[in-house]
Image (cartoon, helix red, strand yellow):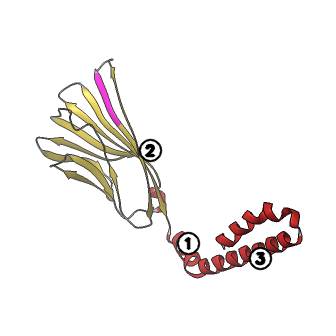
Amino acid sequence: SLSLLHSHIDCGFLCTENTVQSTTSAHVVHLGMTTTINCDYNKTSEKETFRVYLRREQLLCSYFHQLKSWRKQSCKENIRLIWIPETEEVSFELVNLQINDTGVYTCAVERLTPPPVQTLGNQRTSLHVIGHCFIRYLGDITASHLYLYFFILKILLHLAYCFFVLFCRLNSKTKYRLFYFCILIQYCS
């Protein structure tokens, strides 16, 4: 995963400071399974109240943390918040994933108080959900055909070796030039 740390201050109607820890990751998950999207953020920052949310084109889940307790603002039914108080790690668990859950998810952590509002982390996760047909197809190839493919490949390498050895013996001038190639083919087969 990639990690960047940058800071800037935006002042307009409301003054906000952004010290963002930004990371990117990718997940490939089977249909109906569960995955966890981590929310990496700057844990050293002072934060009385902060918000964590998960988005994919639109807001999927949002929680507020204040006075050592969490308050759910809104959340889709297949998403739940995971909080580890000892390490202050936060993540979202997505359960019973479907093909249409494929996409790029963004998890962000924002400090609300003390002011100014500050973005502490921004994690982008590319999620790809693969279906059972694709899995079964790969399983069938692996189980029943892999040995046959290797057997055919070995026969082809042996035939190539035999032709090159025959060529080396018939043409004495190229015997030494192709000698190493013949040895290589024999070694590989």
Q: Amino acid at mark 2?
A: Glu
**Coordinates of residue 76 in the picture (x, y in percent):** 33, 54
Q: Residue at x 87, y 63 (%)?
A: 173
Q: How far is mark 1 from mark 3, CA to CA?
A: 29 Å
Q: Residue at x 44, y 66 (%)?
A: 31
> Vertical placement of 168 versus 83: above or below?
below
Lateral position of residue 49 relative to residue 147, left or right: left
Number of the front mark, 2 or 1: 1
Q: How far is mark 2 from mark 1, CA to CA?
A: 31 Å
Q: Earlier in the sequence, mark 3 or mark 2?
A: 2
Q: Which residue is mark 2?
A: 57
Q: Which residues are magenta?
A: 16-21
> Vertical placement of 84 versus 186: above or below?
above
Q: Which residue is mark 1?
A: 138
Q: In what element is the residue under mark 3?
A: helix
Q: How far is mark 3 from mark 2, CA to CA?
A: 56 Å
Q: In what element is the residue under mark 2?
A: loop
Q: Which residue is mark 3?
A: 159
Q: Residue at x 77, y 76 (%)?
A: 159
Q: Earlier in the sequence, mark 2 or mark 1?
A: 2
Label 2: few (<14), some (14–19) or many (≥20) C-alpha neighbours in 10 Å: few
**Coordinates of residue 10 in the picture (x, y in percent):** 34, 20
Main SS, magenta residues: strand
* Residue nearer the viewer, 92 or 154: 154
Q: Amino acid at mark 3?
A: Leu
Q: Amino acid at mark 1?
A: Leu
Lateral position of residue 52 relative to residue 104, left or right: left
